[in-house]
Image: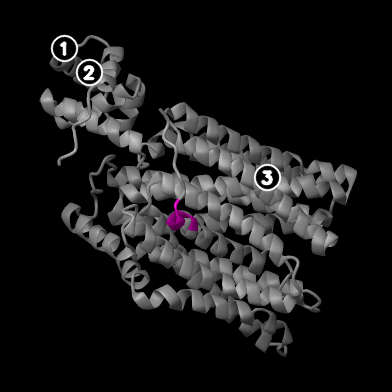
Amino acid sequence: MQHEHTPTSGELMVGAALGCSTAWVSMAFKSMGLYAGMAQGESTLDAVYLVSIISVALTLLVAGALAQETEKLITGKASIWALPAAIAASTLAMPLCTRLPAGADITAMVAVGAISGVASGLFLIRFGVSFSLLSTGSCITAAATGTIAASLLFALFLLFDPLPACSLAASMPLFAAVLLAFGMHVLADQGKAESIESAAEQARKERGKEGPEQMPRRESALSGRELDRLTLQLALCSALIGFSNEAVRTLYVHMGVRDVGGVGYAAVEGGGAFVATVIVVGIALALANMKTQRMARNIYHFLILLLVNSVLLLLVPVVYGQRAALIAHALNSASYACFGMFMWTILAGVCNRCPGQRIRTFAFVRASWALGPLAGVVAGRFVLHQLGISVESAMPIIGFGVLAILIASGFAFSETDLARAMDLLPIRHKRRFREKCARIAAEHALSDRESQVMVLLAKGRNLPYIQDELLLSKSTVSTHRQHIYAKLDIHSQQELIDLVQNTEEKPAAS
């Protein structure tokens, strides 16, 4: 019987908080809403965005390198409100930069961009820690809610004049802070999440107990080397996908989407939000009811196909005119939103299994997640300035965009890497599976290594996969398999799978 996850108020509040935080990025840097009608509005937007995104990336990298100090900072009660307040203040100051005299405006742009970048980077880490404390079902619900809310809030934002638009953008981080705090409090009361303070204490204990080179041994163990590898793969994948998406989005916007203006532009984003809603809900339900690794791969393939199509459609507005860019732009927004939800779930699961390294892991991946889109903007603007809007300008972006996606899915984060990451997600039916395996291992006196091999065999893994996963030779894996079969008095992998499935769970203590 499949498990159906019913959203709770706490999950929806955490999701709405993520939506407000994500919407702030779009409001501040992905439209001219704050600068409409200003003579130097676009150049100011570009300058503030450049400084802010670089500051975000540097903040995340430093935070990852100084994880313990960062942990103390973001778990302090003052940071709960100081960070969003700093983001809000910098947002209100952004349009003012255009009104300052020459020289002072540049200083102001750098200051505003740096403040927004540092504060939002640290605030993002607090979100990462919070999501890592959720179950997979709760994380999916929150990520889906956040994706939908962000799209709708941005579409609403586009309807406002500059002054109310600026006020709305500045309110987003404040709303995010309130919703995140209350949402996590509700989930903690419901027993569905730890508090951030408790998680920080647990992480400190794990680091002290295991040492810097060993990761905590929970349901799925990761060595320091394995975690570093997975962190690098997630970082590279998110950077490549972000590069492809933002390079294409830059051309879509300059192909006439932004010239539609007002209600029309809001309708584009609203349509994208609707498409994203349908896709995200489908992915959330599929992930929440996942029983096999093939399901995860199918979802991943679907996302990659969606991303590739959003790039290939770049030729449509070149041939048929600016109106044709509206649907393509909406698909581009929807596909990246869906990918973001997928990555939030995977990254939260990895951080959940490695509490002693969760800040380091999250910060390094999110730094790449920020730098990839920045490189995409630079590439898109370079092509536009060199070639303008034409088939000649679209083709290199299409080529590099598709190539980046294929490298991301085939090399940086492949199906094998996805299977490894999925093993880290705290899914209820997987806990039952591991409890059954642990009971069998204990009853038949299997060694630790034999237990690890048995779990992988019970999942249907073949010998080459187990060799790669456990870094063992073929003969060693074969020997362990023989010993397991002998101790369990079975003769095949199918018999082992049947044995695990037919093993009764240990009843809970009364």
Single out the mark in the foreground, 1 or 2.
1
The answer to the question of whether label 2 and label 3 lie on touching residues, with beta carbons closer than 8 A, is no
Residue 232 seen anywhere in this rendered image of the structure: no
Q: Position of residue 164 (x, y in %)?
A: 70, 76
Which circle's residue, 2 or 3, is located before the other in the chain?
3
Q: Main secondary structure of the magenta part?
A: helix
**Which label was assigned to residue 275?**
3
Left of 496 or right of it: where is 43? right
Disc 1 marks which residue?
A: 489
Q: Vertical placement of 449 versus 113: above or below? A: above
Left of 2 or right of it: where is 489? left
What amino acid is labelled 1 in the image?
A: Asp
* Residue at 19%, 33% in the rendered image: 507
Q: Please provide the residue range marked out in magenta.
A: 8-12
**Which label was assigned to residue 68?**
none
Front residue of this view, candidates 179 and 222? 179
What amino acid is labelled 2 in the image?
A: Arg
**Magenta segment includes 10:** yes
Disc 2 marks which residue?
A: 481
Q: Secondary structure at mark 1?
A: loop
Which circle's residue, 1 or 2, is located before the other in the chain?
2
Single out the mark in the foreground, 3 or 1.
3
* Residue at 57%, 66% in the rendered image: 53
Q: Position of residue 133 (x, y in %)?
A: 35, 54
Left of 433 or right of it: where is 50? right
